[in-house]
Image (cartoon, grey):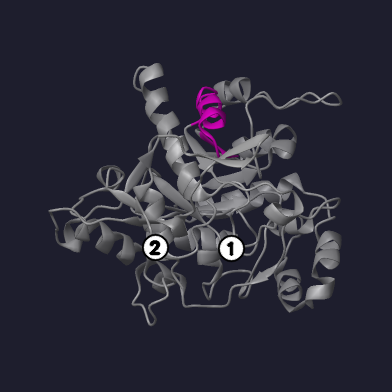
């Protein structure tokens, strides 16, 4: 059966679904939540939680990266953010949180015009390493060639190349593009790369040797990509498509498993559940963790697109403060809105549907939901 819809006589479009459009279906078996494992492993690194923090200044500082690591997740520091541009950005983070909406983008562009300092990249990563947690840092594809050696020399465990969209075949007539396959082959650390939102794009990224692929394009709470560029990839379909690429690449490569990480549109606990149900091994959280009391954004959330010098495709958004980082991860929950006890909700959903670990839960039955949740 075709999933295409006729938009007009000269154009057809494939029907795609967001996490709000789908729901998980219980099976014939249930189990106790205490008997469910939500851990996962990428390369040599095992994590108790299938949660990575998005490399965004509103979410991650060296201190919050350490805190999330101590809770069993992985904090990814933005190596192009304020922590690598300023010795102490605390006052600037407070200023950004206090800005009036009409002036926020212009002032953020001024603040982020400060050059990145390689010595601060080294210092921040060493701060995280000194705490004894797994060290992960992110660069955009445009900055990777310039700063990757500094990142590797500082002792990063996982290297993340994260952009709005990342392809294995970037074409440029003015500069030599980053050759992902050669770059990853020559690097001594596992690389997670993305975003990708289609089967073909993900398969090409997997063939570069990436250990993980980030799935998402413009689906985050702080993105305005759909209204500014007209581009958007509904996340349930995107994750399922990339999971299919993982399956086919596993056969093609003779057994090499590439992890699928949902990055965008995972704002509440139900979204986390459905991301795994659609095929994700883990999720990268932005707004969900920006609601923590410890978050550097003080209840506000923004990404690099919000202060782009030429074409902002994001904005600073108010997400509020829901509780401590520990409460957001493990509860207890004080309201039934999916902002607290994310891990408990995932355990409960897996137990209710009878699955014992994340990889098993990827096989759960999913239906197109007949309603839109409030």
Image x and y of residue 320, in percent: 58, 77
Q: Secondary structure at mark 2?
A: helix
The answer to which of 98 and 349 lies nearer the viewer is: 349
Please say if 128 is above or below 59.
above
User: Residue farthest to the bottom?
Assistant: 334
Per the image, the residue denoted by label 2 is 270
Contact? badges 1 and 2 (CB < 8 Å): no
Packing grade of label 2 (10 A; few <14, some 14-19, many >=20) is many
Residue beneath the point at 30% across and 53% down: 38
Residue beneath the point at 20% across and 62% down: 33
The answer to which of 150 and 167 lies nearer the viewer is: 167
- Relative horizontal placement of residue 273, taking residue 123 as reference (left or right): left
> Residue 244: within the magenta?
no
Per the image, the residue denoted by label 1 is 59
Q: Which residues are magenta?
A: 191-210
Q: Quadrant of residue 246?
A: top left
Image x and y of residue 102, in percent: 83, 74
**Quarter of the picture holding the N terminus:** top left
Please say if 141 is above or below 271.
above
Residue beneath the point at 57% across and 69% down: 295
Residue 200 marker: none
The answer to which of 30 and 299 lies nearer the viewer is: 30
- Relative horizontal placement of residue 59, taking residue 175 as reference (left or right): left
């Amino acid at each position: 059966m075709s999933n295409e819809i006729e938009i007009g006589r000269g154009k057809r479009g494939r029907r795609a679904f967001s996490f709000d459009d789908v729901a998980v279906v219980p099976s014939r078996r249930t189990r106790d939540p205490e008997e469910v494992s939500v851990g996962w492993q990428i390369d040599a690194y095992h994590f108790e939680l299938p949660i990575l923090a998005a490399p965004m200044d509103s979410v991650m500082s060296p201190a919050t990266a350490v805190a999330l690591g101590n809770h069993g997740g992985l904090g990814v520091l933005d190596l192009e953010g304020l922590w690598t541009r300023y010795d102490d950005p605390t006052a600037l983070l407070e200023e950004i949180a206090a800005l009036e909406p009409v002036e926020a983008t212009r002032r953020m562009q001024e603040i982020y015009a400060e050059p990145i300092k390689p010595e601060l990249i080294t210092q921040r990563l060493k701060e995280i390493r000194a705490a004894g947690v797994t060290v992960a840092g992110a660069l955009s594809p445009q900055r990777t060639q310039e700063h990757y050696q500094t990142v590797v020399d500082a002792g990063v465990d996982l290297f993340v190349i994260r952009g709005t969209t990342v392809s294995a075949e970037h074409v440029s007539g003015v500069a030599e593009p980053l050759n992902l396959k050669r770059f990853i082959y020559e690097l001594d650390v596992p690389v997670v790369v993305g975003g990708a939102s289609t089967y073909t794009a993900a398969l090409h990224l997997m063939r570069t040797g990436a250990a993980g692929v980030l799935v998402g394009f413009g689906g985050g709470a702080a993105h305005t990509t759909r209204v500014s560029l007209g581009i958007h990839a509904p996340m349930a379909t995107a994750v399922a498509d990339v999971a299919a690429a993982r399956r086919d690449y596993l056969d093609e490569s003779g057994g090499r498993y590439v992890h699928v990480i949902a990055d965008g549109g995972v704002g509440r606990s139900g979204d986390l559940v459905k991301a795994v149900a659609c095929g994700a091994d883990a999720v990268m959280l932005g707004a969900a963790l920006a609601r923590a009391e410890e978050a550097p954004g003080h209840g506000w959330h923004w990404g690099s697109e919000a202060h782009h010098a030429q074409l902002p495709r994001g904005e600073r958004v108010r997400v509020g403060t829901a509780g401590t980082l520990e409460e957001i991860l493990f509860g207890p929950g004080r309201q039934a809105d999916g902002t607290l006890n994310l891990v408990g909700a995932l355990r409960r959903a897996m137990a209710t549907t009878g699955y014992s670990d994340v990889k098993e839960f990827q096989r759960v039955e999913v239906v197109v939901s007949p309603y839109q949740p409030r």
